[in-house]
Amino acid sequence: MKTLNIKRFLLAMAGIFYLGQIGFGQSHYFELNQPIQMVGPKTTVYLKDYVLDVSKIAWIRSGTFPSDLRKINKKDYSVSWLQDSLVISTEKGCAKMGFVRIGFVDGKDMYIPVKASPEKENQEFDKAPSTYSYSYSKIMPGVKNPPLELEFLIDSDSKVGVLPMWGNDVIAEWKLTPYHPGMYKLKVVVPEKAKDIHKSYVRIWVYNEYGIGNDILVPLVSGAVMKDLMKFGERKDPHGMIMYNIMIDRFFDGNKLNNKPLKHDSVHWKVDYFGGDVAGITQKVESNYFNTLGVNSLWISPVVLNPSEPWGQWKRPRTKFSGYHGYWPISSTLTDPRYCTETELKNFIEVSHRYHNNVYLDYVAHHIHQSHPLYKQRPDWYTPLYLPNGKKNTELWDEQRLTTWFDDFMPTFNFFKPEVVNAMTDSALYWVKTYDIDGFRHDATKHIPNEFWRELTYKMKLETVGKGRQLYQIGETYGSPGLIGSYLGNGLLNAQFDFNLYDAAINTFKSDSGGCKRLAEVLTESLRTYGSHHLMGNITGNQDRPRFVSRADGSVKDNEDGKQAGWDKEIQVQDERALHKLRNLYAFMSVIPGIPVIYYGDEIGMPGGNDPDSRRMMKFDLNEKEQEQLNVFKNLNYYRGVSAALQYGECFVENMGDDFIKVSRVFFGEEGVSFMMYTGNNKARRDYILSEWDLSIDANGELVKSPNDRVRIIYFDNKVNPNGFTLIYAHR
């Protein structure tokens, strides 16, 4: 995809900044149809992923949108309708994008975009178009306004095709004209009926013969562009979410009466119960800890009943483990009294919603503990512990991805059996029906076949349709972007955690210099794979990794066993620069598309090796450095929460060598926002980069702005490298 010429863009934007008067209405769509991603020349699509009642379908067609590419793209996508599924076929000469159109017996219809396989011939992404929002017609209060007009600029040296949609409908009125050499202007007229709907979306895809460019997402409120997020932003909008990851037992003890540590001779105190509970989290909600931090979505560890005796084994020191983490379920419906009662969980959810926080339950679908009654009741529902060759099928994460056991006492469900899928999706649905949760974080996603996820998602849609309840599901998969993406879509999960991006970010931000080239490559690949407005989780860390600050200050070495390091060492913050590196990491995560996810304690710079050392008790009595760290996170979250550019804007990545990366977000006349980091040691190069925006660093290391005030500084840090810097600034 072509790199955004930000200076040309800003010149074009001069004088264009309108405020809209926004009203209210009713939502029209259950969900937006996400594009069908072709995998090879033929791809099967399950209709219930998009249509809840397949019997209401009257006809299905395919095609491509009108464009000046018809001489190049002479052939349309073809479809074969096989009762409950479609087979979409492509051949050489098809456009990079097309559509499936579904008509219903009541006369209505809808469109589903289709994207060509990324491996399709002639796919040269660096030559694909770049599209960015330019202007929109002014909305005058108190008068009848004409339909909203949106304008976009398209950077492409070759002819382009356009796919404009409002909700799941095609936008009929649009015009593409040459604007400058290598640039087009696209004008789109939003349908009049958008004024009658409280919240809807315009989506636009642009492609050329080389590939598909960045997609556009424009939120509308009553037919006007939504820009005032302070007024119209809401916790249920996933694009505005900032998530906080809590391990219940290690956060805050709000009810001393439910404390029941094992206090067993075979269990080291580090892996016993500490006493954190849901009542404690509720108290922190009510004390405004999360609102003040600026997060609006709470992901809590599993609440299901776990065993009351120790299991597992660690060699040095020799210890067994309690089930403090919650991942050894011995019931599918009962809460663990050490965490909460049913009443306490319902109260926590109600209070969280009152304080404008979503609640996501961590759900374990892959396995149960052998003490679960179901293991004896249905012994035929599990995969074999031993393979045909006699090898034990434990921890074979990739070799036996869909059948492996995590440990000898954790039987894996055999989801290749339909009766198992049906029963266990019903078990997950119990939590949706019984508790007013906002969705799930799903453990071990890649170890469960898609048949399970498809059935669960379908049942969740049936349960919530027409109730104004929007559920979000995010999964955990370590693997290639292709494997991670295979679990995403309308009938599957909304998102997964982007561990590949996190790994690249760790290597860049923990270092004193370099790493920018690889980070830019992985970020670009993520945007291309998951979409420019994806809902993937961008984490600061998690319960299965060493704490970032302890990687950054060298307490845990790259080639070291992080778990053992946590047992052998008393790890504390050794180098204050590690705290600045963590700030820079989160600054990056707060700017890029996706959902920022803070692992509890990272907002104050908690140290630690891998688990259990990464699962220390949360600290609220802070020292000066910890408070300073917390304040930085608060400021970054605040700006993320009020910036339309950061939630809906286009994203463009620039990389010039291994010591520089720039990520720009732009959204119509809103202030553009850019993250910029220089990790080199060349002071002259640093000064040149800053001078392009009339910035400089004085002899005291302070950032200096020129008087013309064309930029506004949101974040600045230069404590990691004396000649480098990390910067977030807003610009017009």
Image (cartoon, helix red, strand yellow):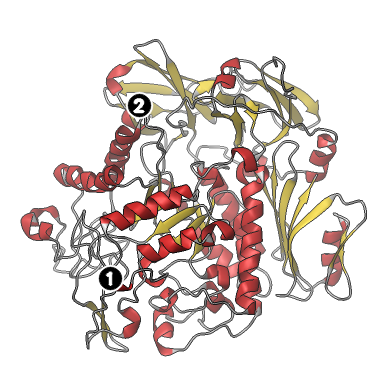
Q: Position of residue 500 (x, y in %)?
A: 50, 59
| In contact (CB < 8 Å): disc 1 and disc 2 | no
Residue where numbered disc 1 is placed: 258
Q: Secondary structure beneath disc 1? A: helix
Q: What residue lies at 58% left-to-right and 59% top-to-bottom?
A: 292
Cα distance between the residues tagged 1 and 2 = 46 Å
* CA neighbours of label 2 inside 10 A, class few (<14), some (14 to 19), many (20+): some
* CA neighbours of label 1 inside 10 A, class few (<14), some (14 to 19), many (20+): some
Dot 1 or dot 2: first in sequence order is: 2
Q: Secondary structure beneath disc 2? A: loop
Q: Amino acid at mark 2?
A: Val
Q: Which mark is residue 507?
A: none
Q: What residue lies at 75% left-to-right and 25% top-to-bottom?
A: 138
Asked whether residue 661 is in view, the answer is yes
Q: What residue lies at 86% left-to-right and 65% top-to-bottom?
A: 687
Q: Position of residue 219 (x, y in %)?
A: 60, 33
> Taking 609 as reference, is 192 above or below it?
above
Q: Position of residue 563 (x, y in %)?
A: 40, 79
Q: Is residue 77 left or right of residue 207?
A: left
Front one among 117 and 236: 236
> Taking 92 as reference, is 596 above or below it?
below
- Quarter in which the N terminus is drawn: top right
Residue where numbered disc 2 is placed: 51
